[in-house]
Image (spheres, helix red, strand yellow):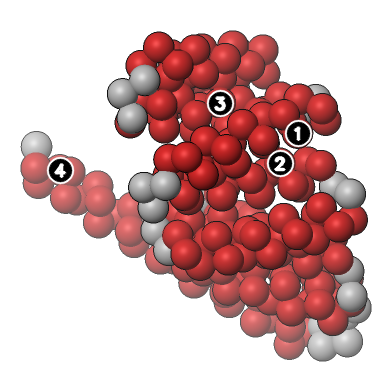
Amino acid sequence: AFAFFELASFWQKFETSLLVESILSSWERYVSAMPSTSDVSTWHTVECLGRLLQHLGIYKEALIFYRKELNLAQRMNDEKAKAGALYNIGWCTRQQGHFDLAIENTEAAKAIYENIGNPIGTAKCRSVLGICHWHKSDDTTALEYLWKSIESFATAEDTRDQAEAYNHLGIIYRSVGNFEKALECLHEASNRHKRLKNSTGLGKCYNSI
C-alpha cells in the first residue's frame, strides 16, 4: 500500500510539474508574440494565470504572476487592481506559512480598499488577517478581525466569504477551548455552505465539527 501511495504521489508531482512548465512556456510565447499588448490586457492575463495556479495550490508560481499583476496595476495607476494584487499575494503567502509577509501585503490591500470604499475587499482582507494572526498565536486580534469581516460581509450580502469567515472563527474558538462558541460558528458556516450548495466548504465545516 505504501508503494502505491509513493507512486501516486510521484505522478501527482510529475503532472503538476508538467502543468507549471506548460503555463510558464505559454506565458513566454504570449509575451514574445504580443510585445505591444496593452497593460490592461496583460493584467487580465497574468491575473487569470495566477488564479489558475492558486486554485491548484501551486502558490510559488502563482506569486510570480501576482507580482506581475501588482507591477501592472501600479503602472496603470489603478488602485482597485493594486489592492486585488496585494490581497492575492497576501492570500498565497499565508498558504505558504509566511504570515508576516501575508499580513504586510494584506494590510496594504485593506488600506486601499478602505480608501476607495470597497466593503467586500476590506472584509476579505480582514478574514485573511484574522487567520494569519491566529497562526501567530494572537487569538484576540484574530477574533477581532474575523468578527469585523463577518459584519462587512453581512452588509454586502456576501454569503460565501462570510461562511469561510465563520469557519475560521469556529477553528479559533475550538483551539482556545471554547467549544460551544466553536460549534455555533461552524453551524453558521455550514448552513451558508448548504444554501450555496458548496460541498467543499461544507466538508471543511463537518471536518471541524
Instruction: Say which quadrant the N terminus sits in.
Output: top left
Name the residue tied to disc 2.
123
Image x and y of residue 42, in percent: 80, 73
The first of marks 4 and 3 along the sequence is 4
1 or 2: tag closer to the N-terminus: 2
Residue 11 quadrant = bottom left
Q: Residue at x 65, y 82 (%)?
A: 28
The residue pinned by badge 3 equals 166
Residue type at mark 2: give it.
Ala
Quote the CA–CA distance across marks 2 and 4: 43 Å
Which element carries disc 1, helix, strand or loop?
A: helix
The residue sitting at 68% across, 81% down in the picture is: 29
Q: CA distance from mark 3 to mark 1?
A: 13 Å
Give residue 152's mark.
Answer: 1
Amino acid type, callout 1? Ser
Residue underneath mark 4: 4
How many angstroms separate mark 4 from mark 1 (CA)? 47 Å
The span from disc 1 to disc 2 (Cα, nearest Å) is: 6 Å
User: Mark 1 and 2 residues: CB-CB less than 8 Å, in contact?
Assistant: yes
Location of residue 55 with respect to 59 vertically, above or below: above
Rendered residue at 82%/27% (across/down)? 155
Q: Are marks 4 and 1 in contact (CB under 8 Å)?
A: no
Q: Nearer the viewer, residue 150 or 77?
A: 150
Q: Amino acid at mark 4?
A: Phe
Secondary structure under tag 2 reads helix
Q: Is residue 43 above or below residue 56?
A: below
Which quadrant would residue 204 be assigned to in this image? top left
The structure residue drawn at horizontal position 34% and vertical position 61%, both measured from the top left corner, is 14
Q: Amino acid at mark 3?
A: Tyr
Disc 4 element: helix
In primary-sequence order, the first of circles 3 and 1 is: 1
